Image (cartoon, rainbow, N blue to C red):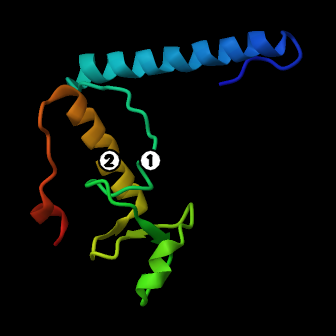
Amino acid sequence: MRPKRGKYSRRSNQKRAYWLKSKIYEQVKRIAYQDYSILTTRVNPRDTSRLTPWGEPVWRGTVFPSKVEDFAVYEPGTPLVATASGYKSHSGLNAARNIAQKAIKRHLEKATLDLKSLKQ
């Protein structure tokens, strides 16, 4: 998704790359709606991996910790997410839930996440 190197200035290439990405977003949005009747929206992914869907900070690691003190360490890029209260999930699934919740909150008033469905 980058323009040809060396042909244009850096700023001009940055603008072209931004335009290319926006064109791809527009085409995907159009195809999703026209062909599959799927509504799409863009959401800021900030803090989606650092928080649970209820706003609690999470611990990230490869193995579930045995001591409560071990929850204080945050390791980026690891597959397991957990809290001291007992919530465990895959980090990608946790981020996807947070992104979906941000999209729902944008379009619905008083959107909440059901605790019973996630703590099985």
- Marks 2,1: beta carbons within 8 A: yes
- Quadrant containing the N terminus is top right
Query: What's the residue type where badge 2 is placed?
Result: Asn
Q: How would you rate the neighbour count of disc 2 (Cα within 10 Å): few for under 14, some for 14-19, many for 20 or more? A: many
Going by the picture, which residue comes out furthest to the bottom?
66
Residue 63 in percent (x, y) is at 47, 81
Please give the name of the residue rendered at 29% of the width and 50% of the height, measured from the top-left corner: 97
User: Secondary structure under badge 2?
Assistant: helix
State the mark number for residue 98: 2
Up-down relation of residue 8 to residue 37 (above or below): above
Viewer can see residue 63? no
Residue 74 in the figure: left or right of residue 92 = right
Residue 12 in the figure: left or right of residue 77 = right
The residue pinned by badge 1 equals 47
User: Secondary structure under badge 1?
Assistant: loop
Viewer can see residue 114? yes
Up-down relation of residue 10 to residue 99 (above or below): above
Residue 23 in percent (x, y) is at 51, 14
Residue 47 in the figure: left or right of residue 102 = right
Tell me how far mark 2 sits from mark 1, CA to CA: 9 Å
Q: Nearer the viewer, residue 26 or 67?
A: 67
The number of discs equals 2
Residue 90 in percent (x, y) is at 38, 65
Q: Nearer the viewer, residue 119 or 31?
A: 119
Q: Nearer the viewer, residue 31 or 60?
A: 60
Counting residues from the start of the chain, the first of labels 2 and 1 encountered is 1
- Quadrant containing the C terminus is bottom left
Please give the name of the residue rendered at 44% of the width and 47% of the height, measured from the top-left corner: 47
Up-down relation of residue 36 to residue 86 (above or below): above
